[in-house]
Image: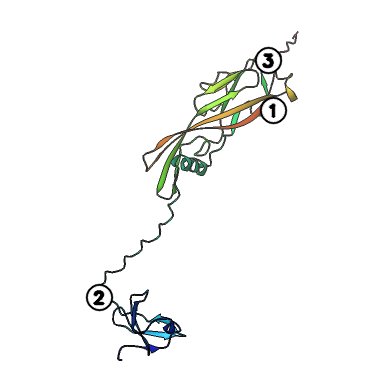
Amino acid sequence: MEGYSRGTPASVSSKPPDNTATLPDGSTATYTSEGAYVQGRNGGPTAYVDGMARPQAEPADPQAPAEPQQPAPPQPAAPQVNPAELAQTAVSQMHLTAPEIASTPNDPDTLGAVGLPVWLWVANPGPTTTGPNSTSATAGDVTVTAAAAFSGMTIDMGDDTTIECTGPGTEYPGTGTEESPDCGHVYEQMSDDQPGGLYTLNITAHWAVDWESNTGEGGQIPLDLTTDKQLRIGSYQSVVTDVT
């Protein structure tokens, strides 16, 4: 018979003659005394292999609905960027440092005097020591812009006195005994009883870093940078000699 395949499956003897059954693939198998004839679901034949019915590929049914497409597997979400943490990265990119402080007297080898004014000022002003300074940092879709401003210094003078300087101080003009207009001190005691005979000055430079991001978030980061220096303070005595 054209369009059919003839075989001798082992299961034929267990089937009564002229028995018709539907196979799992939808094909129709008719068992006769001569063998089993299988009509494919869409007209295709079924072949026998080792006595077992193995359906061949069925021709596509043009009326059958299209197989639904499987959705693409979800992509891992991009890591979330914290704008505040990115602002800290921007601050680190500025390389802000504690300033070098000059004074009169300026070092332990130069003797200052009780009652004479000590002037203090930043000896190396610039973007990293006194500002202004600004930069930006980007991670993913987030960008942070930061601007740093130097806001002054707090100086522990070593004699239980602390002074506040609203800026980088004023450089000593070289002459005169006037006090500094914005960052100075007058010692009332010598430094002889201090460790090493020196006053140790602890200097804290203050910064304020304002930042904003393209996400709408923003804020301010306070930043303190410290340094120190030592001064020797003594006293001058006048010697009066009789002149005859």
Residue on which disc 1 sits:
108
Which image quarter: residue 243? top right
The amino acid type found where label 2 is placed reads Pro
Residue pictured at 42% horizontal, 42% vertical: 145
Which image quarter: residue 60? bottom left
Asked if disc 2 and disc 1 are in contact, CB closer than 8 Å, the reply is no
- Please identify the quadrant where the C terminus is shown: top right
- Residue 201 screen position, x and y as percent: 64, 25
Front disc: 2 or 3: 2
The amino acid type found where label 1 is placed reads Pro
- Where disc 3 sits, the SS reads loop
Residue on which disc 2 sits:
62
Q: Earlier in the sequence, mark 2 or mark 3?
A: 2
Q: Nearer the viewer, residue 231 or 224?
A: 224
Q: Which mark is residue 189?
A: 3
Q: Is residue 115 above or below residue 172?
A: above
Front disc: 2 or 1: 2
- Residue 187 screen position, x and y as percent: 64, 17
Q: Nearer the viewer, residue 110 or 23?
A: 23
